[in-house]
Amino acid sequence: MKMMAAYVHIVDAVNYRIGRVMMWGLFVMMGILLWSSISKTFFLPSLWTLEMAQFAMVTYYIIGGPYSIQLGSNVRMDLFYHNWSPRRKAWFDACTVLLLILYLGVLFYGGLGSTAYSLGYWGDEPVSYFTGLLTGSEEIGRLERSSTAWRPYIWPVKAIMVFGFFLMLLQAISELFKDIARINGQEIGVSRA
């Protein structure tokens, strides 16, 4: 139980801090869209603004997701749930978070494959490709670019998505540990320090 509590404290603290920083990402996206409007009205329109706004939105949404899970601000159907005892809620939440962990695991693995593809890897073992990049046995190939006029590289936004899926996976495991503690009649406190 102490190891679970330590895991929860570390993961929650990291995701809390990252989430608080990502809240400011909304202003970055608003600034990009404001510049887009100004440049279209008074100057030549900028090619980069639409895609950069999309990339900023992906970053804001995906990296801010673990913070949303931590705060419990995700959408939930609360028809019967609010009348249940805390222990019954914990059992139900533990079952649903297991499904979330499975789903996030699939997203994470698919994101690794997509990121490897955007780095020029054509094989079907993305984990071994990234391991090979770290050890020097693999090389980055032809980098994938967007098909728009601006033609930005795609790998940065895909890497951000993989990082966000990883953080959400860690946070979902943290929520599972909190539910297990509640089922056992204990509470794992969350420190924001």
Image (cartoon, helix red, strand yellow):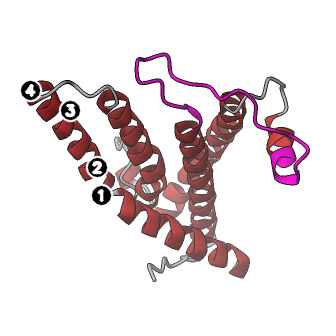
| Quadrant of the image occupied by residue 51 | top left
The residue identified by callout 2 is 28
Q: Residue furthest left?
A: 42
- The residue at 49%/55% (across/down) is 66
Which portion, as a residue range, is magenta?
131-155
Do labels 4 and 3 touch, CB within 8 Å?
Answer: no
The residue identified by callout 4 is 41
Judge by depth and name the residue closer to the eye, 8 or 36: 36
Do labels 1 and 4 touch, CB within 8 Å?
Answer: no
The Cα–Cα distance between marks 2 and 1, rounded to whole angstroms, is 7 Å
Do labels 2 and 4 touch, CB within 8 Å?
Answer: no
The Cα–Cα distance between marks 2 and 4, rounded to whole angstroms, is 20 Å
For label 3, the SS is: helix
Residue 161 lies left or right of residue 5; in this view the side is left
For label 1, the SS is: loop
Q: Can residue 168 be seen by looking at this rendering?
A: yes
The Cα–Cα distance between marks 3 and 2, rounded to whole angstroms, is 12 Å
Do labels 3 and 1 touch, CB within 8 Å?
Answer: no
The residue identified by callout 3 is 36
N-term-proximal mark, 3 vs 1 = 1
Q: Percent from the top left, x then y, of residue 172?
A: 58, 54
The residue identified by callout 1 is 24
